[in-house]
């Protein structure tokens, strides 16, 4: 059992009021709130350990460098990567995918080649490939889903051709909550000799992830969705793949030597970290990872499943409720529409009751198209949410219904 009240005290923002009502924060899929320890780490970093890293011989610079490299090890441990050389710090999931899309396409793809994605991808795992497609003449093939919002693995297997170069799929859908069977998806790709990138933006905050067990070539996530700061994220890549790919950006840090005639790139992981990295953000991210690991990812997952079940039952009892995403394996996300109430109206009126939900297409317009809707309302849960808050949401939805 988790002591939710004690956990909530770690997050000062959760006791705020909006419009004179207690805040009910159910927009965790977009970003999570930050525990005190993470904010303190940032403050301590700037007050006491701040100096540019990897360059200075002086005390502070060495201390800051050590803290940044310790943070890398914390991420390695969190993902169970083989080596800290396999952990590249980026600005987030979006930048990590753009990095792979750019470097992988440069190295491994030519006109006519194909990338397999799924119908439930976030735009950040569609558009970077389309940008490369326009430059290089590659194309996307799309795994469809069934009516419950589960990927059709039978159809997936049929998408492979001799031109397939990469599979890029989300671990957990940010709209449907579907937890995709990525281990199986990866194994199927490997049978065809095709590497796989997994978008872990919505999985890492909720599930225990083991990249060695999954055997993914690339796995990416964002710090701010896992209780860490904004502007920092991670690209995990198998060492042999990161070694093989060319750099994404040029600049300081990523070189071993530079002359006007020739530049030799730095070793991993620095080859992919051009310029001054967010060394304060990396240590704060490590703090966030320690925080969730201390609670325990398995306990987080179990409690969030209990909340999801409660919320699903409670919301399904509302007349006119349509929930999108009924996968057997589902994370703590409920996307819905009620009757013909527009999602913006629902979101705005819930907001006035103190309830923060997300409305719109959730950066997944192709998925909206597949569902035949323009947008929906999304309540995305965290381990700091409570059944009482679910009650407030259900009562709020009933109240909005009465207004229409
Ligand atoms: N992928 C998924 C599944 C997401 O839900 C998100 C954000 O909502 C992203 C990628 C992009 O993450 P970021 O904006 O942190 O780069």
Image (cartoon, helix red, strand yellow):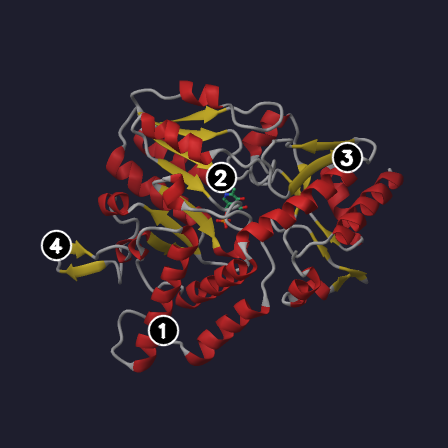
Q: CA distance from mark 2 to mark 1?
A: 33 Å
Q: Which numbered marker is on residue 171?
A: 2
**Quadrant of the image for the C terminus?**
top right
Task: Name the side, left or right, on which 213 lies relative to 361.
Answer: left
User: Callout 1: helix, strand or loop?
Assistant: helix
The residue drawn where x is 59% and y is 25% is 370
The residue drawn where x is 73% and y is 45% is 347
Res. 17 visible in picture: yes
Q: Of callouts 2 and 1, which one flags the residue occurring earlier in the amino acid sequence?
A: 1
- Give above or below for 90 relative to 62: above
Task: Name the side, left or right, on which 233 lies relative to 172.
Answer: left
Task: Name the side, left or right, on which 247 lies relative to 208.
Answer: left
Q: CA distance from mark 3 to mark 2?
A: 25 Å
User: Callout 2: helix, strand or loop?
Assistant: loop
Q: CA distance from mark 3 to mark 1?
A: 51 Å
| Residue behind mark 4 | 262
**Quadrant of the image for the N terminus?**
bottom right
Name the mark nearer the viewer: 3 or 4: 3
Q: CA distance from mark 4 to mark 1?
A: 30 Å
Whether residues under marks 3 and 4 lie with C-beta atoms below 8 angstroms apart, the answer is: no
The residue drawn where x is 30% and y is 39% is 104
Q: Which numbered marker is on residue 55?
A: none
Q: In the image shown, does 242 or 314 lie closer to the viewer?
A: 314
| Residue behind mark 3 | 316
Q: Of callouts 4 and 1, which one flags the residue occurring earlier in the amino acid sequence?
A: 1
Name the spot of residue 286 as percent of width and height, x first. 45, 63
Q: Residues within 10 Å of mark 3 (few under 14, many from 20)?
A: some
Q: CA distance from mark 3 to mark 4?
A: 64 Å
- Give above or below for 83 relative to 115: below
Name the mark nearer the viewer: 4 or 1: 1
User: Callout 4: helix, strand or loop?
Assistant: loop
């Amino acid at each position: 059992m988790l002591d939710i009240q004690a956990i909530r005290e770690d997050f000062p923002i959760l006791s705020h009021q909006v419009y004179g009502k207690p805040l009910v924060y159910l927009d965790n899929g977009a970003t999570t709130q930050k525990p005190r320890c993470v904010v303190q780490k940032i403050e301590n970093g700037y007050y006491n350990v701040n100096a540019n890293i990897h360059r200075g011989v002086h005390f502070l610079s060495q201390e800051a460098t050590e803290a940044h490299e310790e943070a890398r090890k914390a991420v390695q441990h969190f993902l169970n990567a083989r080596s800290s050389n396999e952990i590249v710090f980026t600005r987030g999931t979006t930048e990590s995918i753009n990095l792979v899309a750019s470097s992988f396409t440069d190295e491994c793809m030519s006109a006519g080649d194909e990338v397999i994605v799924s119908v439930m991808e976030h735009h950040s795992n569609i558009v970077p490939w389309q940008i490369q497609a326009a430059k290089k003449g590659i194309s996307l093939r799309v795994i469809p889903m069934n009516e419950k919002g589960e990927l059709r693995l039978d159809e997936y297997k049929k998408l492979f051709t001799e031109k397939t170069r990469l599979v890029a799929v989300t671990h957990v859908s940010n709209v449907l909550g579907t937890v995709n069977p990525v281990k199986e998806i990866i194994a199927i790709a490997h049978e065809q000799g095709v590497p796989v990138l997994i978008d872990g933006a919505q999985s890492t905050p909720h599930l225990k992830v083991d990249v060695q067990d999954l055997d993914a070539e690339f796995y990416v996530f964002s710090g701010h969705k896992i209780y860490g700061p904004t502007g920092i994220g991670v690209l995990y890549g198998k060492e042999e793949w990161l070694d093989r790919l060319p750099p994404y950006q040029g600049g300081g840090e990523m070189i071993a030597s530079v002359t006007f005639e020739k530049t030799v790139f730095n070793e991993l992981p620095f080859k992919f970290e051009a310029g001054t990295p967010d060394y304060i953000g990396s240590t704060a991210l490590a703090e966030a990872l320690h925080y969730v690991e201390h609670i325990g990812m398995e306990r987080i997952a179990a409690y969030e499943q209990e909340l999801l079940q409660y919320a699903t039952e409670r919301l399904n009892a509302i007349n006119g409720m349509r929930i999108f995403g009924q996968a057997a394996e589902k994370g703590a996300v409920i996307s819905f529409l009620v009757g013909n109430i527009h999602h913006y109206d629902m979101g705005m009126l819930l907001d006035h009751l103190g309830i923060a939900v997300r409305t719109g297409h959730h950066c997944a317009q192709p998925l909206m198209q597949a569902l035949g809707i323009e947008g929906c309302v999304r309540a995305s849960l965290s381990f700091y949410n409570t059944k009482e808050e679910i009650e407030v949401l259900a009562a709020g939805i009933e109240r909005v219904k009465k207004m229409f």
